[in-house]
Amino acid sequence: MIEMQDVWKTYPDGTVALQGINVVIERNEFVYVVGPSGAGKSTFMKLIYREEVPSKGHLSVNGFNIGKLKHRKIPYIRRNIGVIFQDYRLLPKLSAFENVAFAMEVIESPRRLIKRRTMEVLDLVGLKHKANSLPAQLSGGEQQRIAIARAIVNNPAVIVADEPTGNLDPETSWGIMKLLEEINFRGTTIVMATHNKEIVNSLRKRVIAIERGSIVRDQQRGEYGYEN
Amino acid sequence: MKISTLARHLREGVKNVGRNGWMSIASISSIAVSLFILGVFMLLALNVNKVADQIESKVTIRAYLQVTANQAKIDEVERSIKRIPEVKSVKFVSKDEGLKQLRESMGEEGKAALEGYNSENNPLPDAFEIEVFDPQTVSYVAKKVMAINETDASKPVTDVRYGKGTIEKLFRITNAVRNIGLIFVAGLAVMAMFLISTTIKMTIIARRREISIMKMVGATNSFIRWPFFIEGALIGIIGSVVTAAVLLFGYSELTSTTQTDIGYYMIQLATLKDVGWIVTGSILAIGTLLGIWGSTISVRKYLKV
Ligand SMILES: Nc1ncnc2c1ncn2[C@@H]1O[C@H](COP(=O)(O)OP(=O)(O)OP(=O)(O)O)[C@@H](O)[C@H]1O
Ligand SMILES: [Mg+2]
C-alpha cells in the first residue's frame, strides 16, 4: 500500500526533516506514527498525501510512484487518500452536509449519488441529525466527525490522520478512535500521527516511532514509549 | 466537462458573490466607478466628435466677386474654382439671394435694418459658396481661390471668407480633446484592471483555505478555477450593468433638459439612440473582460499553475 525506500526530505530552508526512511505499510493496516515534537511525523504524512515531495528516495502509494508523479495527476492520487487534521479544516460557511458533499462534487460524482452517499457517511459518523448545522454550531468532536465523513466519503484506500484527537478531550477522542477503528475494520488503511499516550497504549496497533527524521522503532501492537 | 459540473460551477460562482458580501461589493464598486468614468469620457468623446462633425460640415468658404463682373467672368471664376482638387462643390449665390439669406439670418431686428434695400439698390456683391472634401483644407483652398486674381488682370475676387482662425483653433481643440480622451480612457482601463485584480486577489487570499481544502480532497486546478472565473465575470457583469443603467439614465435626463437650450445654436448633443448601444456594449464587454481577467490572473497566482 505505502512503500518508502531511503526517503529523505530536506525543506528549501535546509532543514532535514526525514533522513533515510524505509518502511512498508500493508493494505488494511492501522499504524500510529509517534515521536517528539519536530521529529518529522507531519512531514512523513505530507509525503504520503503528496503535499510535499521526497528530496531523495522512492515512495509509492497504492502502486503510484508519488515522487515522479506529473502535476496534473496529483488530484487523482489525492482522491484515493483521505486526510484528517487536528484543526478539522472544514469550510466555515458550508453546512455539515455541504462540507462532506463538497469532496464528492470535486470529483464530479452525480448529484443523486452525492446526496445518498453523503447522508450515508453522516449516518456512519452519527451526525445525520446535524446535517444542516454550520461548523461553528458543532462541538470539536462533532467537527472532527464531519472531517472524517469527508475523508471517507469517496471510499479512499488510505486515511492519513495528523493528530486527529489533538484538540479533543479524552472522552471525545475515544469516540473518534472508535470511528477510525470501524473504518479500518471496513477495509481502509489508516496512518495516524499522535501524541496521545493513552490511546496508543490502550488501542494497540503497529507503532512507528520517528526521532530526528529517522525511524527508531517499528513494532506491531507497540506502545507509545514516551512520557508526556 | 459535464453539464452538471458546469451547473455546479455556475451555482458556486453565483453563491460566492453572495458569500463574500462586502468583498464582492468592493469589487463591483471598483469596476462600476472605473467604468463610470470611462463611460462619461466615452460620452464626452462621442459628443465632441458629433459637435466637431457638425461644425466641420458647416465650414464653407465664401468668395465675393467684383460688382462689375459680368456673366462670362463669373463662369470663368467658377471654372477656376472647380479646378482646385480639394473642392467638393461650388454654388453661385447671387446678390439677391445673398440679401435674402442675410434677412433670414438676422431675424426680426434685421428686418428693420435692411428695410429699404431691394434688388435695385442691393449693395451686396455676387458670391460663390465653396464646399471642400476635407474641412482641414479650408484655409489652403481659400488661398488658392484668392490666387485666381494673380492670373486675371481684372482681379475678379474681392474677398474670400471663412471662419479664419476660429476654425483652425476649433480643429486644434477637437483633435486635442479626441486624443486626450483616448489616452485618458486607456489609462482608466489600466487603472480599473489593477483595482479589480487587487480586489479579487484579496478575495482569493481570504479563500486560500477553501482552495487548499479543495486541493486536499482532490480537486483539479481547472475545477478550482472555474467558480472564480464565473465569480469574476459575474462581478464584471453586475458592475457594468449598474454603470450602464446609471449612465444611460443620467444621459437621457441631461439631453432632455439641455437639448432645447443648446439646440438654438444649431449644435445638438448626440441622442441616447445614437450612443446608447455603443456605450452599453463597450461597458458590458470591458467590464466582463476586466472581471474575468482579474480573477484569472489572481487565481493563477495562488494555484501556482
Ligand atoms: N515547510 C517547512 N519548511 C521548513 N522546515 C519545516 C517545514 N515544515 C516542517 N519543517 C521542519 O521539519 C522538522 C519536522 O517537522 P514536522 O512538522 O514534520 O514535525 P512533527 O513531528 O510533525 O512535529 P509535531 O509533533 O510538533 O507536529 C521540524 O524541524 C520543522 O521545523
Ligand atoms: Mg506535526
Image (cartoon, coloured by chain):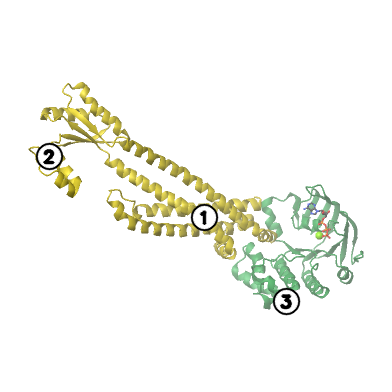
Tell me whether circle 2 and circle 3 mark residues in contact (CB < 8 Å).
no
How many residues crowd mark 1 within 10 Å: few (<14), some (14–19), many (20+)?
many
Q: CA distance from mark 1 to mark 3?
A: 47 Å
In which quarter of the view is residue B249 placed?
A: bottom left
Q: Secondary structure at mark 2?
A: helix
SS class, disc 3: loop
Which chain does the numbered disc 1 sit on? B
Q: Is mark 3 within 8 Å of ligand 2?
A: no
Tell me the residue that label 3 is attached to.
A126
- Label 2 Cα crowd, 10 Å radius (few <14 / some 14-19 / many 20+): some
The yellow one among the chains is B
Apparent side of residue B290 relative to residue B218 in the rendered image (left or right): left
Which chain wears green? A
Task: State which tag comes first along the sequence, 2 or 1.
Answer: 1
Q: Nearer the viewer, residue B125 or B116?
A: B116
Q: Secondary structure at mark 1?
A: helix
Q: Please indicate whether residue B265 sits to the left or right of residue A19 in the image.
A: left
Q: Are marks 2 and 1 in contact (CB under 8 Å)?
A: no
Mark 2, mark 3: which one is toward the viewer? 2
Residue B251 visible here: yes
